[in-house]
Image: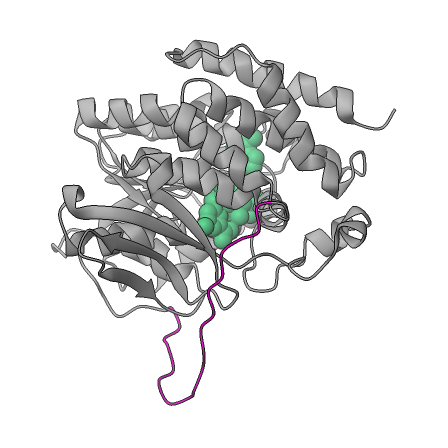
Amino acid sequence: MADAPRKIAVLGSTGSIGTNALRVIAASGGALEVAAISAHSQLDLLVAQATEFAPRWVVATDSKAAEKFDWSKLPKGTELLIGCDELNRVVAQPEIDMVLAAIVGRAGLESTWAALENKKTVALANKESLVMAGSLVMQLARKQGAQILPVDSEHSAIFQALQAGQPTEVERIVLTASGGPFRQLNQNQLKQVTVAEALEHPVWDMGPKITVDSATMMNKALEIIEARWLFDVPSERIDVSIHPQSVVHSLVEFVDGSVIAQMSPPDMRLPIQHALYYPQRVAGVAERVDWGTSFSLEFSPPDPERYPALELGHQCAREGGTTGTVLNAANEAAVGAFLAGELHFTEIVPACRSVLQSHNFDSDPTLESLVELDRWAREEVSHWVFA
Ligand code: NAD
Ligand code: MG
């Protein structure tokens, strides 16, 4: 890496990805620097992070919470900015080299967009911005000459495996999936799943939304759509394989039948580090495969009846247009309702399918129309919740 440190804006710094990213940066010996951090809630943690990293900017996006909060412990030299719009202003600052988009859900779209518009390299954890507006986001990145580096472990693996051949030589992409915590449950047991059970993931320690998405397999559906846009690969060339150990993070099969995989113990710090240092590789903080012990890796095709979310992912990847926005918004609203105890676990996917089916498809939407449709789809889900 060049002598000057790479200055990073960590958006969503208090989340699971954000806190892991700060550990990667802390261990970088000055090669990486925190220029800005942001959070919606958990403002105590935000101040503690500001104290540790002395960023130039701190953004508190929830204005109401921020105005009530006592900021007296914020270090001198760190500027406090309040409100979502400030994210867009911060990512435009010339001294920021890279933006880590680690806000969860639709709330991450505008800042991802603003970063690309300002020609910043985006390390993208926020898959929802590609699910919602993949075609427009990729178009903007191309137009501005801004690079998007995947942080999602599967997409980081694919990104790395793709370097083994030419785009025209790719036969298929295989996304691996752990199968989630309910792999062994029957349909009746699935209906009884509680919020606490859904929030217990067997392999990964993640934020609540993506943990529920992993349990419904909607996360893999969103990842199919993410891969479709990020790598410009059609839906029919994207497969999913259940791989409970989560050591192979995804694979690319080339036309000659060679399959290139990326492997490492499940630890998000590695794909985060890969993106933050790209194109360099460095010895970092992530765990390594222990070749001194014996272990086995299993792969099996997913049962489409057990995981109906996957077909929705394929449908949206195939049809494009407005479908990703509708699926994403319906899913966010349904997951929110489930977490609030207002929807059964097994109703999340049917609610999404129903909203997707009833929307007015448009093959060529604008960003404004997608934002409007996002609102509509959330409202539609409210008809599903318990009275
Ligand atoms: P999280 O819930 O742990 O953290 C989310 C962060 O976003 C927090 O800092 C929070 O303050 C902020 N935030 C929440 N709502 C906001 C709003 N309305 N406006 C602005 N900021 C807001 O989530 P996470 O698990 O870290 O996931 C972040 C993103 O990374 C998601 O898009 C997720 O799909 C993706 N991702 C996460 C993992 C993982 O291991 N956690 C893996 C792959 C991809
Ligand atoms: Mg993933």
Main SS, magenta region, reads: loop
Determine whether 234 is above or below 244 in the image. Answer: above
Q: Residue at x 37, y 77 (%)?
A: 289
x and y percentages locating residue 72 in the rendered image: 56, 41
Between residues 330 and 341, which one lies in front from this camera angle? 330
Q: Residue at x 11, y 54 (%)?
A: 2
Determine whether 110 is above or below 124 in the image. Answer: above
- The part of the chain drawn in magenta is 286-304
The question of residue 290 being in magenta is answered with yes
x and y percentages locating residue 19 in the rendered image: 48, 54
The question of residue 282 being in magenta is answered with no
Q: Can residue 73 be seen here? A: no
Relative to 359, 241 lies left or right: left
Between residues 201 and 358, which one lies in front from this camera angle? 358
Relative to 187, 98 lies left or right: left
Which quadrant of the figure has residue 41?
A: top right
x and y percentages locating residue 357 in the rendered image: 59, 19
Which quadrant of the figure has residue 101?
A: top left
Q: Which residue is drawn at 17% across and 53% down?
A: 163
Q: Which residue is drawn at 43% across and 59% down?
A: 268
Between residues 203 and 274, which one lies in front from this camera angle? 203
Numbered marks: total: 0
Q: Can residue 296 be seen here? A: yes
Determine whether 65 is above or below 24 in the image. Answer: above
Which quadrant of the figure has residue 373?
A: top right
Between residues 28 and 225, which one lies in front from this camera angle? 225
Q: Quadrant of the N terminus?
A: bottom left
